[in-house]
Image (cartoon, rainbow, N blue to C red):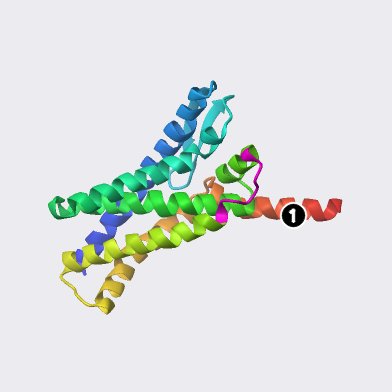
Amino acid sequence: IGKIILFDTIILTLLVIGTRLATVLHEILGHGLMSIIYGGKFNGFYITYFGGGFAYTEGGESFLSIFGGILLNLLLACITLGIIVMLRKRLSASLYAVLLVFFGINSIGGLEYAVTSSYYRYGDAFYAEKIIGHIGIFWFPAMILIAAMAFVFLKLYADFISGYFGREGPFSRILYTVITLGVSLAVYGVLLYVVPEPLAQADARPEYKKEVIKFLCES
């Protein structure tokens, strides 16, 4: 039990640090740098303890300056996955865990933001769709990709904990995935809920509801 609690604590710590790092890179490189490249200004950024972030930019509005944050997260996911696959047998358990969690954050997290933003018409994906003139084109393909990335992530994670805890068999892999990753994600979700912070994915649904009500009232 002590080993599991320690492992859960490590995974939770990696989730907090990994999501903050992914958010910082999302805002600075994905939005800020792209705005500068397209002739705008980057005046800084803000990130929350457990939620999202915001880049303060002026001008330079383009598809890449808006959608660049999500694209950067997906690029980081591909790079991280490539390192895991190529150097899998040479990585230490701790470094493997760091890379694996960072892969999951950038791949599943980035795609989930694309889905909610496009579907509920609020956030980066929706504003990028407005630039190219095709509203709602990202959410369905992003959902397909989420399923694929989740499968890859869970397969790698199950293989990792199977070796780490010395447990073989499908039941043991599922059980240890739930009591490690599942518990850590649940605790992170509680932290996200109890600390009131802005998060585009959470704000998207109520904002969409407001727009629908507004449209119905005007009709």
Question: x%, y% of residue 143?
Answer: 50, 59
**Who's the residue at 48% across and 24% down the image?**
37
**Who's the residue at 61% across and 54% down the image?**
119
In the displayed structure image, the side of residue 182 where residue 164 appears, left or right: left
Label tally: 1
When asked about the image quadrant of residue 63, the answer is top right
Is residue 136 highlighted in magenta?
yes
| Image: magenta residue range | 132-139
Residue closest to the eye, 150 or 131:
131
Q: Is residue 188 above or below residue 1?
A: above
In the displayed structure image, the side of residue 214 where residue 29 appears, left or right: left
Question: x%, y% of residue 186?
Answer: 40, 62
- Residue type, numbered disc 1: Val
In the displayed structure image, the side of residue 153 where residue 143 appears, left or right: right
Q: Which residue is mark 1?
A: 212
- Crowd rating for badge 1 (residues with CA inside 10 Å; few <14, some 14–19, many 20+): few
Is residue 134 highlighted in magenta?
yes
When asked about the image quadrant of residue 154, the answer is bottom left
| Residue 8 in sight | yes
